[in-house]
Amino acid sequence: MSMPSADRSYSGWRRERFGWFLGLTGPQLTCCVLALLPLLVAVGSSRWLLALELAPFSAVLVVLFVVPVRGRPAARWVADVCLYTWGRAMGWSRWRSAAATGTAQADDLGRPDLPGILAGLRMYDGPPFGSTMQRVCVLHDPRAGRWSAIARVSHPGIGAADDTIRARYADQLGALLASAARGEQISRVSVLVRTVPDDGAERAAWLADNVSPLAPRLVQEITAQLERVVTAAAVRHEVYVTVGVDENRIRRQAEQAGGRVEGRARVLYRHLQEMETHLRGLDASSVSWLHTEEVAAVIRTGYNPGEAAAIERARQEWLRGTPTLTGVPLAAAGPVNAPPPAARSYVHDAFTTVSYALLLPDLPTHVGALAQMLAPSAPGERRTLALHYQPAEPAKASRQVERDLWSAEMSADVRQRRGFRVSRSQQRRQAEVAGHENQLAAGHTMVRVAGAAAVTVPSTWPVDDHAASFEATARSSHFRLLRLDLAQDTGFVAAVLPLGIGLPERNAH
């Protein structure tokens, strides 16, 4: 959750889990007690030699359960390494699309063929939506029980925006999330930005329509050279917003609206217009809800950025009346080939991606602080950033703030009574919790947020050099990136594909 201050800086991020005893969570404390129990029994029975023999083992177990290593307890690393090694040995993480191997049948072209955690994803053409009666792709994630729609948004960006406009953007985003929370059906709002190399197809189509063939040959050659230089260094931004509703929250309304996919789509549609209004308030010049073939194309260009030029050329030909195929079959949306993911990167087709979790800063930040991360360090590099928001229902948010207030006040009171100094970080936390209470009274809400980022380059490039440059850019923006070792394929989905996947449920690990 963010809290505006007088200078329009934002802070107030809070961890979801706080250690209630010596910084340890309940499961950690239980494991430590079990690890120390044999040693304590030996000491209690005065069996000192046995206690000396058990002490090293108990100490190692406590370290495994308590000491964090790059964001995970050491014991979790041991389990993840074992599962990762076993999966590679069994060949479970190797992927070849059915279309590439020739095993796909004609009926299979209408079903998604995607690797990893996307294997269960389903895409449907929803009923007509809006005044244009277009069909919107409705994504169903059975694992999460979520129904989603994706919008492609055109936005002027915030590079030239002054502080007043940036503050208005922040207020409008807060209003969007508060509105989603009050509806009590939207479970996820995800914003994804891709900075991709410009394929030049749209510019080439414009030149073909506007350049005179009667121009002098020297002028044409100079123009062609300039176009090649500019296109090689140019980038463009793709912005996607994904809105998802929870199956458990909409089941009754969906049955009343006709049931099955159509009923759930109609309930989802009720929120799309409201979300579009808020996006217009963020100065979005256009908001286009994608249909199934467009979603397949977005996924395809996520796995293979080289396909963007061919898809854009086909779209330009179609706009000019030339009969052509502009979409991508669902069976061809995924990668053609993806070998078993390496521990620290993910290879898909001829490209390699390094994915990160974006850690929220402890210090206050400003609107637009993440924009610097999206500037590629070299032509041909792609950078992506995704923010996944889960607005809390007002009643749950109120209960959470009350618990936080009680915890902060009790902690400060106990320290003062025992003569300990209350640190500045604890004072800041107490002030921020009080600010959260004021925000709820003003109509805002608590929001779970998770960030994911990724950098993609051709597989022949030194990917670690580009990853190091990406990390340095994040540090200069006062953010920190945590490389998702042993989970690069899942991190790729969260950071690169606008499918609303990337924020686990609170009880998930």
Image (cartoon, grey):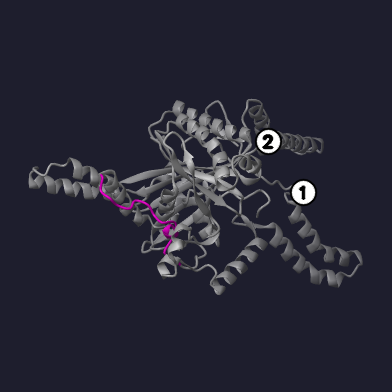
Q: What residue is drawn where x is 76% and y is 52%?
A: 26
Is 475 within the magenta? no
Q: What residue is drawn where x is 80% and y is 62%?
A: 34
The residue tagged with tag 1: helix, strand or loop? loop
Is 337 within the magenta? yes
Q: Position of residue 355 (x, y in %)?
A: 49, 55
Q: Quadrant of the N terminus?
A: top right
Count of marks placed on residues? 2
Tag shown at residue 21? 1
Q: Which residues are magenta?
A: 321-338
Instruction: Please tell me which residue lies in front, 385 or 334.
Output: 334
* Residue type, mark 2 in image: Ala
Of discs 2 and 1, which sits in the foreground?
Answer: 2
Q: Quadrant of residue 54?
A: bottom right
Q: Position of residue 221 (x, y in %)?
A: 13, 49
Q: CA distance from mark 2 to mark 1?
A: 24 Å
Instruction: Please tell me which residue lies in front, 266 or 168.
Output: 266
Which residue position is annotated with label 2?
397
Crowdedness of circle 2 by 10 Å Cα count: few (<14), some, many (20+)? many
* Residue type, mark 1 in image: Phe
Instruction: Please tell me which residue lies in front, 287 or 135.
Output: 135
Crowdedness of circle 1 by 10 Å Cα count: few (<14), some, many (20+)? few
> Is residue 298 rendered to the left or right of residue 315?
right
Query: Which residue, as the protein is rendered here, is positioned at the far bottom?
Result: 89
Query: Which residue, as the protein is rendered here, is positioned at the far right?
Result: 45
The residue tagged with tag 2: helix, strand or loop? helix
Q: Position of residue 368 (x, y in %)?
A: 46, 37
Of helix, strand and loop, which mostly describes the magenta segment?
Answer: loop
Q: Quadrant of the C terminus?
A: bottom right
Is 303 drawn above or below residue 388 in the view shown?
below
